[in-house]
Amino acid sequence: KATVSVLYCSINTYIPILTMPTTPEFLEKEMEAVNEALDAQLLPPLIVEKEPVSVQCRVCVCMLARMSDIYPVRLEEGGRQMPHSVVLVLTPNWLRKEETDTGEVELYLSRGISMDAHGQARLMTYKEPRRVTYFLNLLTKAVTEEVDYGYDFELGRGKYESDPLGGRLLACPRSSSMKLEKLIGDKLLTRLLMDYARVAVPDTLAYVLKSEREYPVAAGAHVNIKHWESVAAIDWDSVREDVQRFVDGLKGKTTRVVVKPSGHLWMRCKGVTYHGLDVDSIVGAATELATGLHDGDSVLIEEYCGTLPSQDVVRAKDLPLRAVLDPATITETRRMAGSVGIIKAEQAMEQIAKNLASPAMPPCVVSFGGEIQDGEGAADELQLPATEGAGAEAEGAGEVMQRSVSETRAERRDTLASLARISVSVLMAFRIRVVVQRNEEGQPTVSKMVCAVGPSDEPLHGGNTVPQTLAITLQQWGFSPGQAKEVRELLTQDAVATFKAITTYEIGLSAEDRGGRLAATDCIGLDMFLTYREGVVTPVVIEINDHDCMRHASLLEDVHREDRGECMRAVTRNMLHKSQRYLQKGEVVVVVG
């Protein structure tokens, strides 16, 4: 791209060839990512200031990160609230350290990328280095899965091993320290804290490898912890007995079990597998995970919390063909021209309800326009829409329906696909991401609830789901407006309780254990499922995220642009507020009037 080539020339004028990670190739790649991200958000291209500039804003929220890991909305919201206050720093070489009287370290920034109030991004080299007033280190393996330059810089490792201030705690407020990152990434710890706070979590059997952490276990906890001193010393016969007892206790509640790893480097559903109540299969999965654990990691064997009865999403015009594909699943249909229908398959609901030991919800048809028709009193016969070629379809349908009952679903699917040339729908499920942030008053507030809709037979993650609003998703799953309001209140209540439990635990830690005197978790994302428990729809928290918790929220705001920046609003105010308090430390404030 011509504009990018010009940009590279400008950058190379001001950035010398340094040791990794700041090589020209590294910067070119990152700058291209910046421009691509801005273009994707319909924002103007990056302007590179050719001369060093002075910035009047004293607040400097520094995000050491790649653009692909933070999304432009962070810079955009920062610029909207306080121009050029939130700065993207692509490499640690743009930062330098200075020791304070207390032995801590202050950071000073020589160049960075920030936005003005209109969304114009600029790469600026500063005449006077800017004092960092809030620090986020997101250039780590737990975020990027590739590089750990951020912690190398902080701890004095790798290319920074000669740094005499390596490993010193930062004086400024910060989030996402290595210690806090490990805390939030420990699914076992956060699950125990939630259980203590009376937030619903899956029943869990946990095996911890050589952990120095003291896990707070309350009486009657839903989490049973076992300890491994080393992988080589694991008594697998004992593990098999534990798993057998755990599985026996789940009978009547579920027919599936989830096996997953826990630790700050295990993310995006890596290593997560589903199993029936088969002890050999479960132990085999745990054995495979154990070989890849680091000290402090865990293997979690947990109750499978099925979402509400899965939906079969089909286009209205494909309803008669879907009935041919599997007529046993259709209990009711209704023509909804031009809209998308969601058919609750009776067969699937009965099976899921049986798995969850709870009654099935009545079948219904929900349109994207919000029209809901209860299954009660609906016509029993399938009404085929009068479309062009309907006679031929019906004739072909009759031939298929007369086939042997023993014909497999896969064979029917292949036959139908060849006859009608349509795409076959899949059963869908949804996960709810609830984003909780600390506001400027230090109190937790729910900033966003986003649903990730995807296939029900796979672990749901960012790579196999589509973001959607909670209101639309609950409407599609048959909730009335009043029921949807109750669900939102339950989600908010559990999310706030979880945030308070985590921050209360952090307060009890030393500055060393938090990664800084002013280090604190300011934002988390809870992954929640709605499931049946004793016949009641109950939110259950599966896990907690920190650094990547706003990805789906940002994607959804790209569609609903009137909400753009909402997911970052509260935490941005908090970062700016903490920055201003930090700058005022030791100063005298005079109020006149």
Image (cartoon, rainbow, N blue to C red):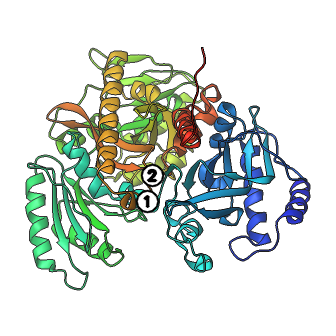
Q: Amino acid at mark 2?
A: Ala
Q: Nearer the viewer, residue 155 or 42?
A: 155
Question: Tag 1, which secondary structure?
Answer: loop
**Residue 329 as seen in the image, left or right of residue 103:** left
Q: Residues within 10 Å of mark 2 (few under 14, many from 20)?
A: many
The quadrant holding residue 380 is top left
Mark 1–mark 2 distance (CA, rounded to whole Å)? 6 Å
Q: Residues within 10 Å of mark 1 (few under 14, many from 20)?
A: many
In the picture, which quadrant includes the C terminus? top right
Callout 1–callout 2 Cβ contact below 8 Å: yes
Task: Return the residue at label 1.
Answer: 515
Q: Nearer the viewer, residue 407 or 572?
A: 572
**Residue 393 as seen in the image, left or right of residue 278:** right
Q: Position of residue 499 (x, y in %)?
A: 35, 40
Furthest residue in direction bottom, as rendered? 232
For image coordinates 29% across by 49% down, the residue present is: 505
Question: Tag 2, which secondary structure?
Answer: loop
The quadrant holding residue 377 is top left
Q: Can the viewer see residue 51? A: yes
Task: Return the residue at label 2.
Answer: 519
**Residue 593 as seen in the image, left or right of residue 540:** right
Q: Nearer the viewer, residue 342 or 479?
A: 479
In the picture, which quadrant includes the N terminus? bottom right
